[in-house]
Image: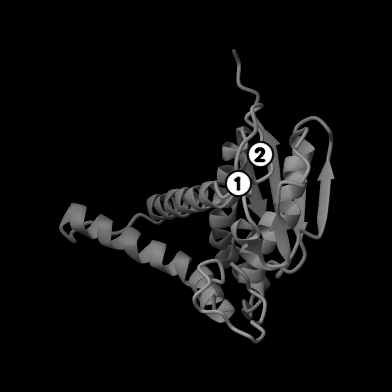
Amino acid sequence: MSFETPLPPYNASDPHATFLNSTCFDLLLIEMVPLAYRMAEQLTAARSGGSTPVDEEEQREAVFRRLDALGYRVGQGLVERFDFGSSSLLSATTLSTEADLVVLGDHRFSRDRPRFTDTLDMIKFLCKDLWTLVFRKQIDNLKTNHRGVYVLTDNTFRPFARMSMSSPSEALTRAQPFLWFPCGVIRGALAIMGINATVQAETSELPSATFQIRTVTVKS
């Protein structure tokens, strides 16, 4: 998949030459939140027969679960494009011919790509390659305490690019649900790479967004 402007000659018969209208993709990311709210309202009305008013807190929790779960599946699916090494960590994609090369934007993943050796390598992969695939830019800043906590900052988070309101506080409140889907994407991608993690996100000023990843050690 590529978000780059296709250049001639076009080869529509090439099964790997898949192009996506970037504007449609942006609109899809924006519409996911109101769609999730509508679905939550409809499910509540169906269960109560329309006689019970919608509880805002319950509705918000239902929307969070739906968007987080959707993002989780998307994150898993994106990373499943690649094979795993014997250590259960993400390894290079096994390629037999040039036609098997997977093109993600400007990034090509091949057998020459080094294996990930630790969690930080995986987080860097997420910040650079995976984020570019989904949001067409890299994470702007990555910080870690080297004890399982990673803070990712996107200074121009794409779903916030066209968001503005008269009240800054209202804008931040309305923006929060748009962070739930990417939180799920991060969790799902890391889960496929063998890392259990919790992800929290916030924004203090549009269009920036900050994601905090905290890895979870599984007790044996």
What colouring does the structure picture have?
A: one colour
Residue at position x 74%, y 44% from top? 123
- Determine contact: label 2, label 1, CB under 8 Å: yes
**Comes first in the chain, label 2 or label 1:** 1
Q: Is residue 158 left or right of residue 30?
A: right
Q: Is residue 98 left or right of residue 65?
A: right
Disc 2: CA contacts within 10 A as few (<14), some (14-19) or many (>=20): many
Residue 90's mark? 2
Q: Nearer the viewer, residue 120 or 30?
A: 120
Provide the secondary structure element on which disc 1 rests. Answer: loop
Most extreme residue toward the top, as rendered? Answer: 220
Disc 1: CA contacts within 10 A as few (<14), some (14-19) or many (>=20): some
Q: Nearer the viewer, residue 66 or 118?
A: 118
In space, the residues marked 2 and 1 are separated at their CA atoms by 7 Å
Most extreme residue toward the bottom, as rendered? Answer: 8
- Kind of residue sitting beneath label 1: Phe
The residue wearing badge 1 is: 82
